[in-house]
Image (spheres, rainbow, N blue to C red):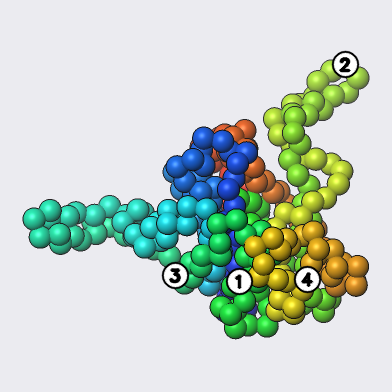
Amino acid sequence: MVNEDKDIPVVILCGGLGTRLGIETMSKPKPMIEIGGKPILWHVMKIYSHWGYNNFILTLGYQSDKIKHYFMFYKEYTNNFEIEMKTGKYEYLDESEIVDWNVKLVDTGLQTLKGGRVKRIEKYVSTDRFILTYGDGVANIDINALLKFHKSHGKISTLTGVHPPSRFGEIIHKGSEIISFSEKPQASQGLINGGFMVHETELFDYLSSDVNADFEIGPLEDLAGKGNVQMYKLPGMWACMDNVRDMNYLNKLWNNNDAFWKLWK
């Protein structure tokens, strides 16, 4: 993919506790919970990489060491290798997973809210704009189309509006006859912020590095009140890993080759 905006950093929020995943996040942070044997964070990064965005900034917090360790030893985690135990020498048997990623891993505090986390990585953003997303949401989204939309309106921020998956399955019927049954369809009404945001660096002027500085509540509300937030309506599908049920659902999609967010080969 030819990408004129390839230097724009993708900031991924990775510091939350993920308490609704219960025991799953006792031993690892939420972005490291796996779908098909890979952390959901990897899936998010692969979506961006597919469109040519390979410059990442990860805002770390809870169990940051687990994420740092994963990227420090990424090649070992993702490839087969042989090690000579006596000398410690090793060589890769194959390199099936090769990525051209530049990843900055930045500790932004254990209890810091999202606004504070974003403000604390300001010094690492050298471009006029940056992408911001959550470390637990996936979509079949065209990132280049999102950037094109953002640049077209000239405002500070663009959010991606998505239809959240319905909490329950949906019966499609004609009278008393059931036509089809969808286990977890997209809700037909109402949009929420699904992440996949683009911001001009002016956003930092509205943020505080304080540990209690939120993002949606406060800064985005202020910007929206001034007409500086636009919505890109996702034409495709979106899902997040908010709880164990979501985790099982996403794994089921992946295992059945129905992962709608898998845009890469």
Is 216 located above or below residue 178 in the figure?
Answer: below
User: Which residue is the site of mark 2?
Assistant: 176
Q: SS at mark 2?
A: loop
Amino acid type, label 4: Ser
Residue 12 is situated, as x and y percent measured from the top left of the image, at: 59, 62
Q: SS at mark 1?
A: loop
Q: Is residue 183 visible?
A: yes
Q: Nearer the viewer, mark 4 or mark 3?
A: 4
Amino acid type, label 2: Ser
Q: Which mark is on residue 120?
A: 1
Q: CA distance from mark 2 to mark 4?
A: 47 Å
Q: Which mark is on residue 157?
A: 4
Q: Is residue 54 visible?
A: no
The part of the image, by quadrant, that contains residue 235 is bottom right
User: Which residue is the site of mark 3?
Assistant: 100
Q: Does label 4 or label 3 sit earlier along the sequence?
A: 3
Of 9 and 221, nearer the camera is 221
Residue 242 is situated, as x and y percent measured from the top left of the image, at: 64, 42
Q: Which mark is on residue 184?
A: none
Is 254 located above or below residue 42 in the figure?
Answer: above
Amino acid type, label 3: Asp
Query: Left or right: 48 with respect to 99?
Result: right
Density class for disc 2 (Cα within 10 Å; few <14, some 14-19, many ≥20) is: few
Q: Does label 1 or label 4 sit earlier along the sequence?
A: 1
Is 87 located above or below residue 167 in the figure?
Answer: below
Q: CA distance from mark 4 to mark 3?
A: 28 Å
Locate the N terminus by quadrant. bottom right
Amino acid type, label 1: Arg
